[in-house]
Image (spheres, helix red, strand yellow):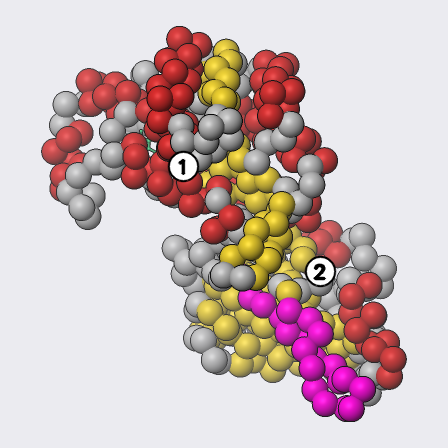
Amino acid sequence: MVGGIGRECSLAYAAEGARGVVMADLNYEAALDTAHESEKLAINPKYKALALPIDVSDPASVAKMVAAAVETFGRIDYSVNSAGVGVQKPAPADEADLDEMNRFWKVNVMGTLNCIQAVSKVMKRQEVKTITNRGRMREVGRGVILNLGSCSSFMATPHIVQYTTSKHALMGMTKNAALDLAQYGIRVNAICPSWVDTPMVDAAIEGNPDLPKLMKTIIPMSRIAKPEEIADVVLFMTSPRSSYVTGFPANDLRHARRFITSHNGKGEGIFIGDDDGAHHRVMVNGNAVANIIYSTKSNPVDMNDEKDIAYAKNTEPGIHVADGSVARLIDFAPGVESPFHRAMSIDYGIVVEGTFELSLDSGEKKIMFPGDMSVNRGTMHKWRNCDQHRSGRMLFILLDVTPLKIGEKLIEQDLGDLAGEYADIENP
Ligand SMILES: NC(=O)c1ccc[n+]([C@@H]2O[C@H](COP(=O)([O-])OP(=O)(O)OC[C@H]3O[C@@H](n4cnc5c(N)ncnc54)[C@H](O)[C@@H]3O)[C@@H](O)[C@H]2O)c1
């Protein structure tokens, strides 16, 4: 897409040696113009620029663009989804123009989804690319999708509910697509600039002449971003240099790595695993991710012939394993609270990052900081990430217990609203 940001990205790809760039926009003239401009800057002798008309809100139009790209170049390595519309009718939310709301939904939200769907279909069929970096080879996946979010993906600005809503939705879509497509080696991310000097902002300034003064006051660098500064971030986010970056419900936390040891023939310790966990599960309406670090089906654990490793790899456990154990890392998005639930197990809970509140069904509560630990002995409880702006991470180790009675009453597992999250697992 070739508005201010899309145009600058196209030129940057050409200048950095891309083999080809497709510039597709509702404004075909602008696409053609950018294509010609990019040819002047291209350094790859085989460079080809393809300008196409497209309406991202129409899936058929998007499919046509993708088919043309594949026919010309054979594959799609990066897709930068920057088509978007600006606010024409600012108004408080209670008076928001419904046609305008619809326009934002169709272009900014559905338009992006149409592009993700059409492009990922192609990327899924592509070979995984590899690069050699400082003498070491690594896989960098099948393709990268980058969406244009905005600081409006996180905050509200008066009178632009249509923009704020569409950019919040875009972040949810990015997180979900990142999670769903990671298994195919397709990375999905969003970048979220504040104001960038493009025609979209020119139009905003026309409607609000005080905007430049406001920018000076509230932007830490006291100036608007140049489109080329955004293009540099786009280049990084789509290049192999960011091969381990993909969206996540808790995307401000680093990916935790898991190292598994075993023995060589002499009985010495060796590392046999270096990854980010075997089973991931999105929970709490897409606001938390559980990452199973390990699970065992018995206690003591039979480690002969690496039986335990095969079990952990092949079995996604329920909330806990009868006679066994589970180590589960959970990342909570900002402010997220789990439902009340009880696993019939001893749960060691360790705060890894952030601040959490542990509440019991009696009403008692405790605040926990990094390094604090809870030993939860089968109580009905819930967790809340106390930070409204940052994600938090907890590690839970769950060991099985014998039946527990309080007086005459047998205390049983009760997953509450979490039950649905484990419904597809045997023996949840
Ligand atoms: N400029 C900023 O300050 C800023 C800040 C943060 C995020 N963004 C986002 O970056 C993206 C690009 O913004 P920009 O500043 O380059 O805007 P822009 O107005 O310069 O470019 C947007 C482009 O999208 C095209 N477009 C609109 N509807 C389309 C449709 N249905 N199908 C295909 N193309 C369509 C327009 O023709 C235009 O060329 C947008 O998603 C915007 O919300 C912009």
Question: What stretch of residues is rendered in magenta?
Answer: 255-274
- Residue at disc 1, CB closer than 8 Å to ligand 1: no
At label 2, the amino acid type is His
Give residue 275's mark.
none
Give residue 16's mark.
1
Per the picture, the main secondary structure of the magenta-coloured stretch is strand
- The residue at the point 72 percent across, 90 percent down is 268
Residue 87 versus residue 85: which sits nearer the camera? 85
Q: Earlier in the sequence, mark 2 or mark 1?
A: 1
Compared to 199, does 362 lie above or below? below
Quick check: is 281 in the magenta stretch?
A: no
Residue 425 location, quadrant:
bottom right
- The residue at the point 64 percent across, 69 percent down is 274
Confirm or deny contact between disc 2 and disc 1 (CB under 8 A). Answer: no
Quadrant into which the N terminus falls = top left
At label 1, the amino acid type is Glu
Residue 158 location, quadrant:
top left
Q: For numbered disc 2, what is the local secondary structure?
A: strand
Reading the image, the residue beneath label 2 is 279
- The residue at the point 51 percent across, 13 percent down is 52
User: Where does the image place residue 354, in percent across and percent down from the top left?
Assistant: 44, 67
Residue 342 appearing in the image: no
User: Where does the image place residue 31, in percent across and percent down from the top left?
Assistant: 42, 15
Quick check: is 256 in the magenta stretch?
A: yes
How crowded pointer 2 is (Cα within 10 Å; few <14, some 14-19, many 20+) is rated as some
Quadrant into which the C terminus falls = bottom right
Query: For this view, does 227 lie left or right of residue 357?
Result: left
